[in-house]
């Protein structure tokens, strides 16, 4: 009983919680890094010479800055999760169908870019981004409480870039990225014998600093035709923190379930972007993008308890996925540019990988946006994205890796409205 209950607590809380970090980064990777790029659903994002915010996908695009330039962006994400047909079978009660109030919260995601030309052909850049973020919170008594209650994830990246104009039609660039990640996750912990109420478990982990890099090339083989390739590397994340428990039953505490330090080692995926921009007329531009996210870097998730609890392991076997988009940019007048786009955003997971923490599925974007010239030196960019996803069923049987967390089933319909506003100014 002693050994079995320790394993139960580890799987119930720890393995389930790590699902959030990695599935959330796949299904909820933050693509809203630029109000300008969002207007065309990221179409042409690695090739565009519009402004320096496109450097997130291709650092060579910093070379388009001829003056010191500051770009400040804020994206407001308003998600909605409609959950139906909820049922669960835990350890302290028979099957129940207790739903939760809205589990997802609105969020504001900032990004900042600064370009400083040091010569006619070389530009240095600094940027601050949030590549991954998630926040969800279920009611503590809902049917999936052993799988998830609260989830908070954030990855902040500070990049130092350099771009160089080799000749009239070739630009190259590179950057070094510093990443800091944090994660807070809660879940109910059963007493495993049906005689006492649930306890609560909390994990908080972060890393001091992780490193990545990006490379890019931008080409204009003929006037009006722009091609770009950008690559963001994998990032190894080594996190440490604490596991704390409250209101545990005597059965759990007697089996050695105690507050302890924890660690987790994971890898954020690479991102490869191919883009083309083609001027169709003097006023109309077509953009195309294909982005490949290397989620196959994640085959399993493992958390280590620095106590007598056993490691908890979850096999995911993620696949690499592609994002495709097409968009149009129209110069409506001297002061106003209009944009629109459509994108298909594929999920790396299948139905067996889904979790209540992040029940992601394939998504579609429809976007609109524009740029208004306030003065010769300052522009305001704006965009709106309507994001919808395929309906999906999260189904967990109380077997294998979920044996001690109980069964759960629920149908998810997730959508979001995303608004972005940015200011670009030169000095």
Image: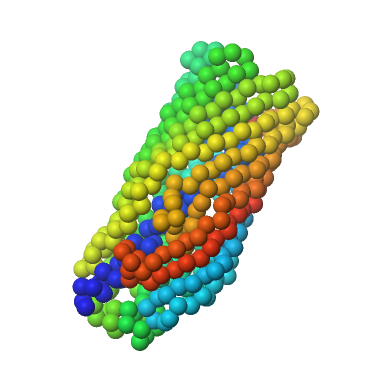
* Residue 124 visible at all: no
Q: Position of residue 227 (x, y in %)?
A: 54, 22
Relative to 246, residue 205 above or below: above
Q: Position of residue 114 (x, y in %)?
A: 54, 34
Relative to 405, residue 299 above or below: above
**Viewer-closest of 84 and 192:** 84
Quadrant (top left/top right/bottom left/bottom right) for the N terminus: bottom left
Q: Residue at x 52, y 38 (%)?
A: 323
Q: Residue at x 23, y 73 (%)?
A: 4
Q: Residue at x 55, y 36 (%)?
A: 324
Q: Position of residue 337 (x, y in %)?
A: 73, 32
* Residue 388 visible at all: yes
Relative to 35, residue 109 above or below: below
Left or right: where does residue 393 sit relative to residue 260? right
Q: Residue at x 41, y 65 (%)?
A: 396
**Viewer-closest of 59 and 28:** 28
Q: Position of residue 336 (x, y in %)?
A: 75, 32
Quarter where residue 282 is shown: top right
């Amino acid at each position: 009983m002693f050994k079995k209950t320790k394993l139960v607590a580890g799987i119930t809380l720890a393995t389930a919680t790590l699902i959030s970090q990695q599935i959330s980064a796949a299904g909820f990777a933050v693509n809203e890094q630029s109000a300008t790029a969002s207007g065309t659903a990221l179409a042409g994002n690695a090739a565009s010479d519009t402004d320096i915010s496109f450097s997130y996908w291709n650092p060579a695009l910093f070379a388009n800055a001829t003056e010191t330039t500051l770009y400040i962006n804020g994206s407001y994400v308003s998600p909605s999760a409609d959950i139906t047909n909820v049922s669960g079978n835990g350890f302290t009660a028979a099957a129940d169908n207790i739903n939760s109030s809205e589990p997802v919260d609105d969020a504001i995601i900032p990004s900042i870019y600064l370009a400083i030309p040091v010569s006619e052909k070389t530009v240095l850049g600094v940027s601050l981004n949030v590549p991954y973020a998630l926040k969800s919170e279920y009611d503590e008594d809902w049917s999936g409480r052993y799988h998830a209650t609260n989830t908070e994830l954030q990855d902040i990246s500070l990049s130092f870039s350099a771009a160089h104009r080799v000749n009239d039609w070739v630009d190259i660039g590179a950057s070094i990225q510093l990443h800091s990640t944090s994660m807070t996750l809660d879940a109910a912990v059963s007493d495993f014998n049906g005689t006492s109420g649930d306890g609560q478990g909390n994990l908080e982990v972060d890393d001091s600093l992780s490193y990545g890099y990006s490379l890019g090339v931008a080409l204009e083989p003929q006037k009006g035709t722009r091609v770009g390739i950008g690559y963001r590397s994998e990032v190894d994340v080594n996190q440490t923190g604490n596991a704390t428990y409250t209101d545990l039953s005597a059965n759990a505490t007697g089996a050695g379930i105690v507050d302890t330090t924890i660690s987790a080692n994971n890898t954020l995926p690479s991102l490869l972007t191919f883009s083309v921009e083609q001027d169709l007329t003097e006023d109309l531009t077509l953009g195309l993008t294909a982005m490949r996210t290397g989620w196959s870097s994640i085959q399993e998730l493992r958390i280590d308890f620095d106590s007598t609890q056993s490691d908890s392991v979850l096999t995911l076997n993620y696949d690499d996925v592609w994002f495709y988009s097409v968009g149009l940019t129209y110069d409506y007048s001297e002061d106003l540019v209009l944009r629109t786009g459509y994108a298909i955003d594929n999920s790396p997971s299948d139905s067996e990988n889904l979790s209540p923490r992040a029940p992601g599925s394939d998504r579609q974007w429809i976007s609109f946006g524009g740029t208004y010239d306030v003065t010769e030196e300052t522009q305001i960019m704006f965009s709106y994205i309507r994001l919808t996803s395929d309906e999906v069923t999260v189904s967990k049987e109380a077997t294998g890796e979920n044996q001690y967390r109980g069964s759960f089933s629920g149908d998810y319909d997730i959508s979001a409205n995303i608004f972005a506003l940015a200011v670009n100014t030169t000095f």
